[in-house]
Image (spheres, rainbow, N blue to C red):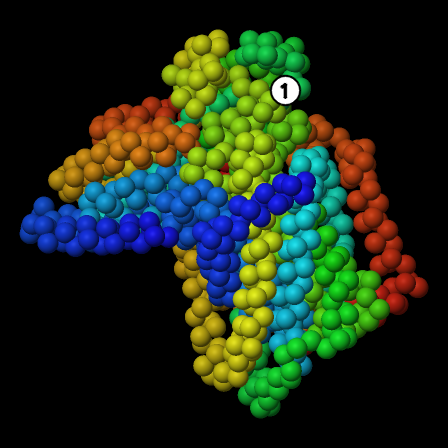
Amino acid sequence: MLDNLLFGFGVALSWSNLAFCFVGVTAGTLIGVLPGIGPLAGVALLLPLTYSLPPIGAIIMLAGMYYGAQYGGSTTSILLRLPGDSSSVVTALDGYAMAQRGRAGAALTIAALSSFVAGTLSTLLLALAAPPLAAVALSFGPADYFSLVVLGLIAAAGLGHGSVAKSVAMVALGLLLGIVGIDITTGMLRFTLGLRELEDGIDLVSVAIGLFGFSHIIFSLEESRSEQRAVAPIHKLSLTRQELRDSALPTVRGSLLGSLLGVLPGGGAVLSSFVSYALEKRISKQPDAFGQGAAAGVAGPESANNAAAQTSFIPLLTLGIPPNAVIALIGGAMVLQGITPGPEVIDKQPALFWGVVASMWIGNLMLLLLNLPLVGLWVQLLKIPQTYLFPAVILFASIGVYSTNGRAFDVFLAAAFGVLGYGLLKLRFEPAPLMLGFVLGPLLEENFKRALLLSRGDLAVFVTEPKSLVLLGLATALLCVFTLPSIARRRHKVFAESDN
Amino acid sequence: MKQGIHALFSALLLAAGAFFAQPAGAASFPSEPIKLVVGYPPGGSTDIAARIIADKLEKEIGKPVLVDNRAGASGIVGASTVARATPDGHTLLFAASPEIALVQALGRQINYNPRTDFEPITIIAQVPFMLVIHPDVPAKDLRAFLDYARKNPNKVNFASYGLGTSNHLIGEYFKTHTDTRLVHVPFKGSAPAMTDLLAGRVQMAFDTVPVVLPQVESGKLRALGVATKDRSPLAPNVPTLHEAGLPDFVGGTWFGLYAPAKTPEDVLAYLNRAFVNALKDPDVSQKLHGRGIVPVGSSPAELTAFADSEIKRWSEVVQRAGIKLQ
């Protein structure tokens, strides 16, 4: 194994491959920083450029862009409460709160450091255990997915406000928004209002930018008119010892969580950041601090999404199955280079496999060196007066939303979600549980139906499959924790989250 | 990178040359960049095929050829954009079978007429399907599999990209054609379907050759045949389904090029020549073949006849299988 990794470093450390890696991670950072323009649009744009490159260099570059975007995506989340892509939605919660307390530099540094640690751990995992992890992904059937999603949804209550009813309402609204579009099992159109654009469902980017970004801009404008809000003074950029200590364990937990969830098709990076946040909040000694700028609330999700981005290569490189759209695009690039992603890549293309794995660690190091000096620069953004900053942000976010599908409709949709988000903020509903419901809703329904289709309608399948049974057991236990009155009193303390 | 810059410069030079060489008048088509509308997101096989061809075409005609992804509603969003575009040949539909043939067969509500709102230009390519099963199914070839499926009705599951998609319809066609009772399990696209097929939760699927071939070669799936007239050059050892015992069983998806109705004749002729030439290019052909896409390049009349035959055939399948959308 060590020989293989050394061989991989030999490949990745050639001058040309280092250059490809650098171009990839730099482009990824930029794409991540632009709100709404996610790695999918970025990789699609860069794809034609790779046609004339050598295969290994091309894949190293595209991979670098993908995990590079995970670094960059957190920047606008932290500074402007505007998620650069969907997997950094959660970072907006505590990252932005930290920025408001004048700790923007610290939050950005935590994001970069925890992403680096996550990148290192998941690269190691990729090198050590790619085939067994792929086997785990394969053994996850529809019943198991369903139960995993149930567990995730129950945990979602922890994302929200003190009021259980409000959290549940938000999750339910999210679930309903998630099923908009054509149902693949019956072909039925649901809640499409006769709009062609809604047949494939509501785009995640529109929801995220609208609910988190636009709504917040409206809210801030109102606030700054009523009371002239001073921009939080930017303290030292470096971390305090306390912040470093608070981030250490969440980073390790987030990395492991992200590495595991990244392998599973579908949810991947987005899900892992939500789950990590919920987990950190639950086990924290100071749950009250979450939502008010807890370092752990940045470190956990940021490490999780970066780790997930990296391990999501496992199914592609070992099974030939892309777990998400970006990886599918990278798989497409491999095919164009004459390499078929699949079980034989490791044996037949060892230079490619180990070279790409090694380049991931090198890329992460480059990202760290690239991002730490940039922290000072990004923080200056906060000094721009709102009169200039907000229109610019809205412009860039709109371009980002438009670029996802090339449809103006999505921009209007983001605007509508901005208004909805503003209403929710006013009524003290948290948008985070809605987001999770929205992501998980389609997975829940699809896997429920598929599990029953495969079991020929036998509901017992959810308890006869061992993994499903364990997950449902955990979900039930969690539900008990919520509903038992004595613990429920404590719950208020655990889950209360301030409004801003 | 260096090569990229070279390519950029040579493209610029070509463009400049073409600009000065351009005669005035009606023959000056194309006078602006050509937009190939693809009704699917970037990265899918329709998109990749369009990009490979656009790349070549750009060099041939000396104007930028842009791929415009208007994804949504299985290609319908893209097709309706082109149906309403200015008919000057600068906006073209790089169509796949769903928005032209399957929408009609499934009786979906659409705001364009695939037969009258477009001018056919050429059949771009065929994308054949391969029939694969999980190796746990006790059958080495098609005949044995059919025996097994008939003896065990409603036991074999077959995966598809979703209700009413191309590989769902070919699965239903297979059912009626072979008189077997298989259970349809829809997925959201090819990748999740492949996961459950590899794990053996579903036993059978039709999918494109490059997707299933690596799995077949490593023994994780078993190929029963390709649904084409001739064997696939990618998998010369796999028989056609015709050879394996299903006479004339062919099917897959296909790409065709259309312009909005009322596009001038000479422009259509120009486009037909340009695209057919691009498809003949060895480099383009090799890249397409690598993705399991078989380039064609036909006359406009052949595209019309082929599309009509597809509409007729899949309408029959939809009716016999009783598939209902909406």
Secondary structure state at the residue bearing disc 1: loop
Report the amino acid beneath label 1.
Pro
Residue B258, image quadrant: top left
Q: Which residue lies furthest to the right in this view?
A: A486
Location of residue B89 in the rendering, given as x and y in whole percent from the top left corner? 21, 46
A452 w.r.t. A27: above or below: above
Location of residue A470 in the rendering, given as x and y in whole percent from the top left corner? 82, 42
| Residue that carries the numbered disc 1 in the rendered image | B135
Q: Measuring 41% from the left and 31% from the top, which residue is drawn there?
A: B290
Q: Measuring 53% from the left and 75% from the top, which residue is drawn there?
A: A378
Q: Is residue A287 left or right of residue A387?
A: right
Instruction: Using the image, name the chain to which the residue with label 1 belongs.
Output: B
Q: In this view, does A51 lie to the left or right of A493?
A: left
Q: Residue furthest bottom?
A: A228
Q: Measuring 40% from the left and 46% from the top, which residue is drawn there?
A: A53
Q: Measuring 37% from the left and 52% from the top, which residue is drawn there?
A: B1
The quadrant of the image that shows the N terminus of chain A is top right
How many numbered tags mark residues here? 1
Location of residue A194 in the rendering, given as x and y in whole percent from the top left corner? 46, 50
Q: Is residue B245 left or right of residue A432?
A: left
Residue A34 visible in image: yes
- Which of these two is toward me, A258 or A405? A258
- Which of these two is toward me, A63 or B108? A63
B172 w.r.t. A276: above or below: above
Location of residue B20 in the rendering, given as x and y in whole percent from the top left corner? 10, 54
Residue B184 visible in image: no
